[in-house]
Amino acid sequence: MFISILAAVVLLCISSVQATQTFSNTGTKAGWDYIHEEHNGHVDAVTNVIYEGSSALKMTQIYDPGYSGRYHSEVHHNGAYRRGDTGFYGFAFRLQENWQFSPAQSYNIAQFIADFSGGSCDEDYMPTAMISITGNQLVTRRKYGNVCPKSAQRTEYYNNIATVTAGVWHRIVIQASWKSDATGFYKVWYDGVKVLEKFNVETTVTDDRAFQFRVGLYANGWFDDGGLRGDQGTRSVWFDEIATGTTFADADPAQW
């Protein structure tokens, strides 16, 4: 009887730590819920610059001084999280070799976002957590509070959490416990090193709708700052080994 109980406990422990990769993409245009190519931007599957395997996604945006809209070149995975979930999210990325870091301007490379159109305020697509590059520094944020009125939204930024270099592949892994009260947590790893860890914090808004996980190049600084800083108006970022799951190994591009 004791052996049977012990065996059952061991099996239960093993099953509780088994990895479950809930989404994965090996640098192709297949399998995404949407491919967002805004204005003159584009998303291409390429074979000449890859992290591993046979292809990667090259995201490009081109600045247009006569255009007043946003600049997204992204792929979307729907249903990445709802309030109350916990998960890991990862990808590999590479900036073009001659990426202009100065003057500093923000370029978003990943975000969690949902459509709030039709609500009681004029909010539409609103992101919670984001990963971006400002100058040569990695930046992230968390957003919480009520969606409406917009003045009830709260955002906390974490600047300068890692230094980014151009022309080489880097790995990002995020782990989040998505809570709208102070029981959540938010962690970020860069190239396998934990660079941010926040416990007992709000990590999402007071809403239960599903959020997308988007990766790609969103040249948000061009819109937010009202124009291009510097003179590099064509930007490209490559992405590969994009995944979500229940363990670090599920999402870490080096482990699958």
Image: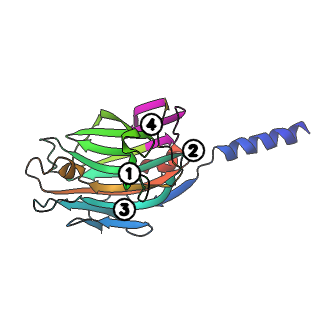
Q: Which of 23 and 47 is in front in this view?
A: 23
Q: Name the residue under label 1.
A: 126
Q: Mark 4 points at which residue?
A: 187
Disc 2 from disc 1: Cα separation:
18 Å
Instruction: Please report whichever mark, 2 or 1, sits nearer to the chain's N-terminal start.
Output: 2
**Amino acid type of the residue that numbered disc 4 sits on in the rendered structure:** Lys
Q: Mark 2 points at which residue?
A: 84
Mark toward the viewer: 4 or 2:
2
Mark toward the viewer: 4 or 1:
1
Disc 1 from disc 3: Cα separation:
16 Å
What is the residue that sits farthest to the left in this orientation? 231
Q: Is residue 240 visible?
A: yes
**Amino acid type of the residue that numbered disc 2 sits on in the rendered structure:** Gly
Mark toward the viewer: 2 or 1:
1
- Quadrant in which the N terminus appears: top right
Q: Is mark 2 on a helix, strand or loop?
A: loop
Q: Mark 3 points at which residue?
A: 75
- With 227 as the anchor, is 194 left or right in this view? right
Instruction: Please report whichever mark, 3 or 2, sits nearer to the chain's N-terminal start.
Output: 3
Please tell me how crowded label 1 is: few (under 14), some (14-19), or many (20+) other residues with Cα within 10 Å: some
Image spot of residue 17 (x, y percent): 63, 43
Please tell me how crowded label 2 is: few (under 14), some (14-19), or many (20+) other residues with Cα within 10 Å: few
Image spot of residue 45 (x, y percent): 31, 67
Instruction: Please report whichever mark, 4 or 2, sits nearer to the chain's N-terminal start.
Output: 2
Q: What stretch is highlighted in magenta?
A: 174-199
Mark toward the viewer: 3 or 2:
2
Q: Is the magenta stretch mostly helix, strand or loop?
A: strand
Disc 4 from disc 2: Cα separation:
16 Å
Q: What element carries label 4?
A: strand
119 lies above or below 156? below
